[in-house]
Amino acid sequence: MTFLVKKNQLSASRAACLISPEQVAAAEPMARVSSIRRSKGVADLAASPLRRFIVGLIALMAGSTCIPAYSGIVDLPPVKVTAKREGGGADFSCRGIACSTSVNEESLAAQLSFLEEFERYPDELPALDPVKVCKALRQKRPPGCNYSESPSVPGFDSSWTANGCGTGVRANWFLNAALSQSNSATYSGDLNAPFAGVSFLAACNSHDLCWGKGSDRAECDQAFRGQMEASCMAVPSGSSRNICIGYASLYHAAVSTTDASHEAYGRSASDFSCAVWTYDMKTNGCNP
């Protein structure tokens, strides 16, 4: 099994993970193994350090919060979890958190079962029952997600394209922002370049992609603003540059503070979750 983290940063040192009481309580039933028989008597797992370790491990894999204590940052690829399939065939392969969690849960359950039966850990990670993995993944279907109609999102639909600044739902936000300038005469009439001669098109397309991939909203929005302001640096310093930066601020506010933007980002994040879940279901041969 291969584990890689979703966040594209990781340290070679260590990370502290917080496990809530609720996660521990949820993990208790899985760790309730009656006993482990050893050559010298019977050890009650209920009070053993091993059980406490297992409970913590289950809770951790079920979604605890990890706070990194980085000493050096390195780049890693996106999350990917793979595991062998019982009965042979292609390994399980996950792109999303729902699938990764399902595989991890079933892998841990299989290891606990082996430990109870043979009183030792398996030499290799056990192959997983596809029926159980698919059932676990099916139960993690994102709300409102339709298996038969996966949303168009970047990375999962080759036909997906960014809308730029002048088309799509966000065009109206930008238009309202541009016309709200105290001196609307400075508006060029082109939403992709509200200040004549300075294009925000690349910034808008990058922002579309960032939201479309379900990335952190604050990071997407801040990068959007930074890219627009960088474009304004081509304007000679003075009032003209300030007007250009003013448009950048208005565009940033349009995507980060309005009710419509909150709803739109929520839809983008939901669409991406649904697309990833659908992809993982189909890739691993799971029926809805």
Image (cartoon, grey):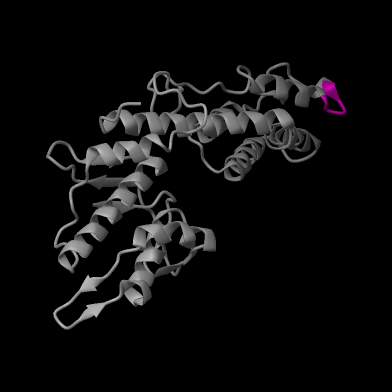
Nearer-the-camera pick, 25 or 150: 25
Q: Is residue 196 above or below residue 246?
A: above
Could you tell me which residue is drawn at 34 percent across and 70 percent down?
51
Q: Is residue 278 above or below residue 136?
A: above
Q: List x then y, in percent, for residue 255.
A: 67, 33
On the picture, is 101 further left or further right than 63? left
In magenta, the rendered stretch is: 180-184
Nearer-the-camera pick, 218 or 58: 58
Nearer-the-camera pick, 181 or 196: 181
Q: Main secondary structure of the magenta part?
A: loop
Q: Is residue 197 visible?
A: yes
Q: List x then y, in percent, for residue 54.
A: 35, 66
Q: Is residue 196 above or below residue 210?
A: above
Picture quadrant where residue 31 is located = bottom left
On the picture, is 106 further left or further right than 272? left
Q: Residue furthest right?
A: 182
Q: Is residue 152 above or below residue 89?
A: above
